[in-house]
Image (cartoon, helix red, strand yellow):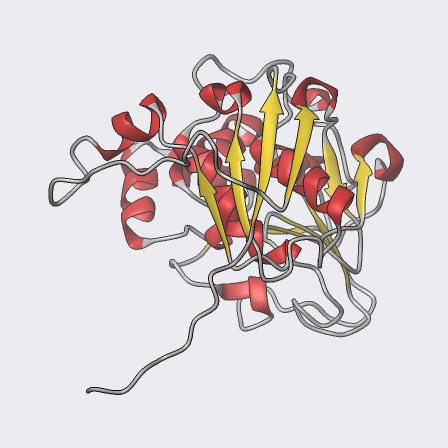
Amino acid sequence: ALGELWFRVPETLKFVYHNRLKEWVEAKDLILYVIGQIGVDGARSKAMEHTGEALRHIDMEARLTMTNMAIEAGAKNGIMEFDEVTKEYLEGRAKRPYQPVSSDPDAEYEKVFEFDVEKVELGVAKPMSPDNYAPLSEVAGTRLDQVFIGSCTNSRITDLRRAAAVLENHKVAPGVRLIITPSSHQVAIQAEKEGLIRTFLAAGAAWTTATCGACLGGHMGVLGEGEVCLSTTNRNFPGRMGHPKALVYLSNPAVAAASAVTGVITHPSEVLEKMPAGLA
């Protein structure tokens, strides 16, 4: 108990976001775009610090999607500036008193990146890497065998609400498997209370227990040779979701839900004219 452990304190990269995301563009699109700009090793062994006025319009669950994907840029961690959104989220959740920690005004960063998020388009990560970013328009019409809405990245209750809004009164396209996996047991219970599961089942989706599932090619959605999947997960390396020759595209939940309805990668506005107030 008297030994020592050596830890390296990572250098910090600062990401500053200006303006506001456009309609349909979500935090998932933003982080895929950022990773596309810096690469899967662009933050290797660094800390990614996210800040800027754009974050005021991004809810906590969407922020968790961004920090979750820090590792996809090689980072040791991803953190967000503490603000009123954070404070509101912690009310009723914090189990003990806390003291917010913020960067010093004169903090030194290895590098600072600035992004006008209003210019970020609805997008995807193409096979075979999370940094293979492309605007949705570039891959629209790509035929799909499977759509997976799940994982620690994008199956929180807000993600499922958006997916349900798109799927309402629609059916999954023939020949396409839509698999929806909640991120936790608590999320599954809330989805049942809100009637989201009924919407998913009525559309023809398969609803699973809370698990990693298809994300890592473990079970309930393992891809076969040559199959094409659109997934809300965090990575799409060869063999990640099954066969090494399967192709995986990454997207946000609304795009995934709309694409399950049409059977090809689709802009959600082609299925739902406008996301309901409170979900946009």
**What is the x, y in percent for residue 136?**
79, 34
The N terminus - image quarter = bottom left
Residue 71 is at least partly visible in this image? yes
Q: Is residue 11 left or right of residue 259?
A: left
Q: Is residue 209 above or below residue 69?
A: below
- In the rendered image, residue 129, in percent from the top left (x then y), is placed at 76, 58
Q: Is residue 114 above or below residue 206?
A: above
Say which of 66 and 188 sits in front: 66
Q: Position of residue 119 (x, y in %)?
A: 74, 20
Q: Residue furthest left?
A: 96
Q: Residue at x 78, y 66 (%)?
A: 246
Front residue of this view, candidates 150 and 5: 5
Q: How many marks?
A: 0
> Residue 187 appears in which quarter of the rendering?
top left
Q: Is residue 16 left or right of residue 201?
A: right
Residue drawn at the location 33% of the way across and 30% of the way down? 86
Q: Residue at x 63, y 17 (%)?
A: 23
Q: Residue 32 at what x, y percent from top left?
A: 68, 42
- Left/right placement of residue 270 relative to residue 252 reads right
Taking the image as drawn, is residue 160 in sight? no
User: Could you say which quadrant of the image residue 238 lies in?
Assistant: bottom right
